Amino acid sequence: MTGHDHSRTFQADHPEPTSDAARIGLALRELLIEAGHYTVDEEQVVIAAMQGASPENGAKIVARAWIDPAYRERLLRNGGKALEEAGFDIAPYEFTVMENTGDIHNVIVCTLCSCYPRSLLGMSPAWYKSKSYRSRVVREPRKVLAEFGVKLNEDVDVRVHDSTAELRYMVLPQRPAGTDGWSEEKLASLVTRDSLIGTQRDLRVRCRS
Amino acid sequence: MTAPKFTTGQRVRIADRTPPVHHRVPSYAKGQVGIIERVCGMHGEPEKFIRGDGIPAQRLYRVTIPQTELWKPYDGTASDILEIEIFEHWLEPAE
């Protein structure tokens, strides 16, 4: 590397860009780095953090909330602070946790784009970014949820959360029956990505040897 | 940090306007009446950000709107709700 302290692509294993949009993105990145807005080292730290993010992080938070009622209370009241306690941070966004109960079901969407707590849960699923999900789940949530296998009776209220600005959401699913006395780690293994978005309601208790 | 103009439980109307810049209010929510669910923090305002006027922080709220008010007909129950984040300058008190 001479003159430039940054490689052409974000990551060495990325293919050369072929679309105009990808080229514009890379050109913008080069300009931002040359203008000193951030360094390649800072960029690599963010990329590494994003790659380390996964639904397992959310599962740990959920399991802790199931086991510790005081933590659950803090998580629902001030998600960001409770997240810090668990060693995570999604600043500048406000982490917001919505609790499912016997008569409330929460589901998350971003109708305007595809906002998602990515630095905590990793990349969002492809369907979460689809126009179909984004437009339909606000208009006909019960029908969309049924397509995901979530059949809700009329005595369960549906709460759709449109992530339009600076909050990032996670659903706190219900703890399944038959898990009394389970360790936090074992409980966390039950939690799925979709249950953190709200497109799954009942968690299955799998038999593990 | 300025004091919030609205409080939890207050009825508000979301402005029905379309500025010719990026803004974070979906068209389905414009003109709707809802209840402040919670008062959130101060955040950069997207409309001014896009014009390059700097990013003056604005108070953000979560607003609850009954689904049966948003969509007619709505295939669900009267207690189904939608909750959405709206900046203060998009809200006015409702009757």
Image (spheres, coloured by chain):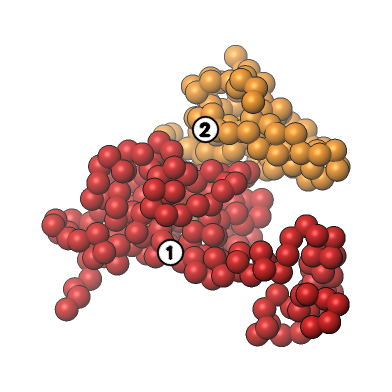
Chain colours: A red, B orange
Same-subunit check for callouts 1 and 2: no
User: Residue A59 versus residue A131: which sits nearer the camera?
Assistant: A59
Q: Is residue A66 above or below residue A49?
A: above
User: Residue A96 versus residue B32: which sits nearer the camera?
Assistant: A96
Number of residues whose C-alpha sits closer than 10 Å to that of mark 1, classed few (under 14), some (14–19) or many (20 or more)? many
Query: Residue A111's spot in the image, x, y percent?
Result: 62, 51
Which residue: 73% across, 38% down? B45
| Quarter-of-image position of residue A5 | bottom right
Identity of the residue furthest to the front in this view: A2
Q: Is residue A105 above or below residue A45?
A: above
Which residue: 29% across, 56% down? A63
Which residue: 76% across, 39% down? B55
State the residue position of label 2. Answer: B64
Q: CA distance from mark 1 to mark 2?
A: 28 Å
Using the image, tell me which numbered label, if any, was put on residue A115: none
Query: Residue B60's spot in the image, x, y percent?
Result: 61, 33
* Image quarter in which the N terminus of chain A is found: bottom right
Describe the element under mark 2 as helix, strand or loop.
strand
State the residue position of label 1. Answer: A55
User: Residue A162 versus residue A2: which sits nearer the camera?
Assistant: A2
Which residue: 50% across, 30% down? B38
Q: Is residue A17 left or right of residue A50?
A: right
Question: Comparing marks 1 and 2, which lies closer to the viewer?
Answer: 1
Number of residues whose C-alpha sits closer than 10 Å to that of mark 2, classed few (under 14), some (14–19) or many (20 or more)? many
Query: Residue B29's spot in the image, x, y percent?
Result: 64, 37
Instruction: Specify the amino acid type for callout 1.
Output: Pro
